[in-house]
Amino acid sequence: MSPSRAHHDAGPHVVVVGGGFAGLGCARRLAKHDDVRVTLLDRNNYHQFQPLLYQVATSQLAPSDVAYSLRKLFRDRPNVDVKLAGVESIDAAARTVHTTDAGSFTGDVVVLAAGSQPNFFNTPGAQEHAFPLYALDDATHLRSRILGVFEAADRDPSLLDDGALNFVVVGGGPTGVETAGALADLIRDTMTVEYRDLAVSAARVHIVDLGHTLLGPFSEHAHDYVAKVLGRKGVQLHLGTAVTEVGAGHVALGDGTTIRTRCVVWGGGIKAPALAARAGLPQGRGGRIDVEPDLTVDGFPGVYVAGDVANIPAPDGGSFPQLGSVALQSGTWAADNILAEAAGRSRKPFHYHDKGIMAMIGRGAAIAEVGPHRHELHGVIAFSAWLGVHAALMTGVRDRVDAFIAWASDSFSSARGPQLLDHAEAAQIDWGEDAAPEPMTLREGDSAGRPAAAT
Ligand SMILES: Cc1cc2nc3c(=O)[nH]c(=O)nc-3n(C[C@H](O)[C@H](O)[C@H](O)COP(=O)(O)OP(=O)(O)OC[C@H]3O[C@@H](n4cnc5c(N)ncnc54)[C@H](O)[C@@H]3O)c2cc1C
C-alpha cells in the first residue's frame, strides 16, 4: 500500500465490481469518506453511458461522447483505486474477487455491480450474426456495419437485390424503438443527401417483436403513439412475430417471411452476466442475484449487489426494473448502508425515487410516463423529461452536463447532422454465399419490384 493511503486504514476496504451506473454511484458516494478505501474493478478503464449507445451506432455521437475514463473520474480521490481487470469469479464467503489478469482482491465489503449481458434466447445464428447493442464496442461495430453496407452498395448497386439496405431491429422495447427511429432518421436526413449515386429510397428499417405492442411497459395509448411515429418514419413493424433464425445475409421469421439483410440489430433482451453464476450467490429471476431489501445477500455478510445484476424487491412484490436510475440509486444506497454499518448504525431498505419511463423515437419525438399515476407526455415535453432524467443520470457519472444538454437539444431539433466517419477495413463485409431458407416470400407493402422483406 502506498504511504498516501496509510491513513485510510481506519474504515472498511470496499471492492466494487463494475464501473457502470451502480458501481459508480457506490464508489462516488464512498469516495467522499477519506477513511474508506475503495478498489473499483472493471474490464474497461471507462464508464459507458448505455442510454446513448444507439446514438453512437447511428453516427450521431462519437464514442468519446459516451465513455468516461474511470481513472479521470477519481483523479482527485486518493482513497479510490481503479484497476483494469476482468473478474472471473467471486468467493463471496471470503469476500475475495478473482480476476483473470490482475490477481485477487479481498475486501471487508464486496459490492457486485456487473450489469447484464445480451440474451439471444438460443435463437440460431443470432450470437454469430446479429449486432447486440450493449457496450461501446457493440455500438462502434454496428456503426461500421451500417456505414459499410451503404459504402458497399454505393460501389456495387446490385447488392441492393441482396438486401444491402435492409435493416432489421429485433426487439420492440426502448432499445429497439430508439435504434429503429434513429436509423430511419439517418437514412432519410443524411444518407439520401450524402450518397447521391445510390437509390437510398430502397432502404428499409424493420422492427420484429414477439409481443403485439411496442414499448411493452408503457400504456396502450403510448403503444399507438410509438407505432404511429415509427410508421411516419417508414419503419415496418412485424409484431407478434418470432425471429427463428439469423444468418449471414438474412433473418427468418416465424410467419414464414425471410428478410434479406446484412445488418440485424439485437435489442431482444438481456440476462444476468456470466459472472453472476460464478459468485456462489442465490440466483433468482433471469439469473440475477436475489438481494434483501437493504441490498445485502442473505447468509453472506459484507456482500452487496446493486444495479441490473440484482433482483431488488419492489413494493409491488416484483423486482425493480433494469434501468439506469435504479442502478445509480441502488449503488448509492449500498454505499450509504456500508457507511451506516461501519458507523454501527442499522442498514435501511432501498427506497427508489421513480423517475418514470421514457424513450426517444428518433428526432423530434419522445414518449415519457412519469409520476406515480404514470402521466403520459409526448413530443417536446416528453423530450424535456427525458433530458432531465438523463442529465441526472449523467451527473451520477461526471459533474459537467452542459455539453450533453447542448448536444441533446441540437439533436432533438435536428440542428446538427450526424458525422459519418469510418475507415475502409472497419466497413469490410463478407458478401459471400448465404443459405437463406426457401421458399422466398414477398410481403405486402414492400416497394414495387424490389421486395424489401423478401429474398
Ligand atoms: C442500449 C441500452 C439503452 C438503455 N437506455 C436506457 C435509458 O434510456 N434509460 C435508463 O434508465 N436505462 C437505460 N438502459 C438501462 C441501463 O443502461 C442499465 O440499467 C444500467 O446501465 C445498469 O447499470 P449497472 O451499473 O447495473 O450495469 P452496467 O451499466 O452494465 O455496468 C456494469 C459494469 O460492469 C463491468 N463488468 C461486467 N462484468 C465484468 C467482469 N466480469 N469483469 C469486470 N468488469 C465487468 C462492465 O464493463 C460495466 O462497466 C439502457 C440499456 C441499454 C443496453
Image (cartoon, rainbow, N blue to C red):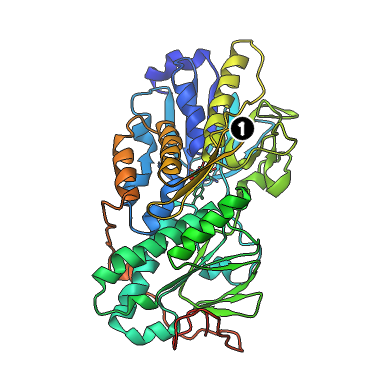
**Image quadrant for the N terminus?**
top left
Report the residue at 49% width, 22% height from top: 30
**Residue 301: in sight, yes or no?**
yes
Percent position of residue 453, x then y: 52, 79
* 163 shown above or below 47: below
**Which of the pair 102/204 is nearer the observer?**
204
Q: Tell me where residue 154 sits by quadrant.
A: bottom left
**Which of the pair 72/372 is nearer the observer?**
372
Percent position of residue 303, x then y: 65, 29
Report the residue at 39% width, 83% height from top: 160
Percent position of residue 315, x then y: 71, 31
* Residue type for callout 1: Pro
* 168 shown above or below 336: below
**Which of the pair 30/397 is nearer the observer?**
397
Mark 1 neighbour class, 10 Å CA radius: few under 14, some 14 to 19, many 20 or more:
few
Report the residue at 34% width, 68% height from top: 147
Percent position of residue 243, x then y: 62, 70
Q: Which residue is mark 1?
A: 372
